[in-house]
Image (cartoon, rainbow, N blue to C red):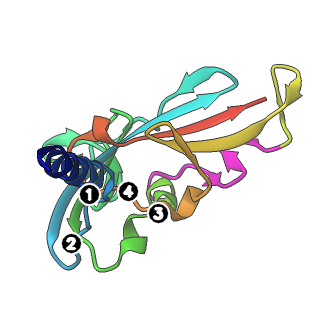
Amino acid sequence: MKKIIMFIVLIVITVLGIWQFTRQPQIPLNKEIHMHAYIDIFICGKQRDLPRASEATLTHRKKFVGIPLLHTHDDNIMHIEGVVRNKNQISLGAFFDAINVTFDNNKIFEVKNGDLCNGKTGMLKMYVNGKETNTFRNYIPLATPEPKKQVISLVFDS
């Protein structure tokens, strides 16, 4: 009987642990939020940075590219800071639009699916924390303040 109880307790702990680590934090709407995601872009094997600020536009006393709600501070991090009325305002597509970078399910910067990459046909793929996804522009970031807990990789390669 003790073994059965211990087995059940172990299963409950395991299930609760899996649930805790796989659930997505909810994005609070109509409230001030401060979230981040690290953006990792590779084109034909070479890392590509997000645009760098060229003007003296400041937010939090730092130069930025984008808009106050969606911006980057020359750090390859998607900063989401402000009041969100609906989740589509903070989609990955909205972020790239805000920083004026061409991005869709088949293109990033100046390359698009079918272009050559190291002599072979290239294709854009998207990963979130190492797991492939096809949400591209529609991806809604996780509600996490720590950028390295959410790494969005956009890889154009053959």
What residue is shown with label 1?
143
Q: Amino acid at mark 4?
A: Pro
The answer to whether mark 2 and mark 1 are in CB contact below 8 A is: yes
What residue is shown with label 3?
94
Secondary-structure class at tag 3: helix
The answer to whether mark 3 and mark 2 are in CB contact below 8 A is: no
Against 93, residue 29 (above or below) is below
- Magenta segment range? 98-113
Q: Amino acid at mark 3?
A: Ala
Q: Is residue 37 magenta?
A: no
Q: CA distance from mark 4 to mark 3?
A: 11 Å
> Pointer 1: residues within 10 angstroms few (<14), some, or many (20+)?
some
> Pointer 3: residues within 10 angstroms few (<14), some, or many (20+)?
some
Upstream in sequence: badge 2 or badge 1: 2
Instruction: Tell me the tag on residue 141.
Output: 4
> Pointer 2: residues within 10 angstroms few (<14), some, or many (20+)?
some
Q: Position of residue 64 (x, y in %)?
A: 30, 44
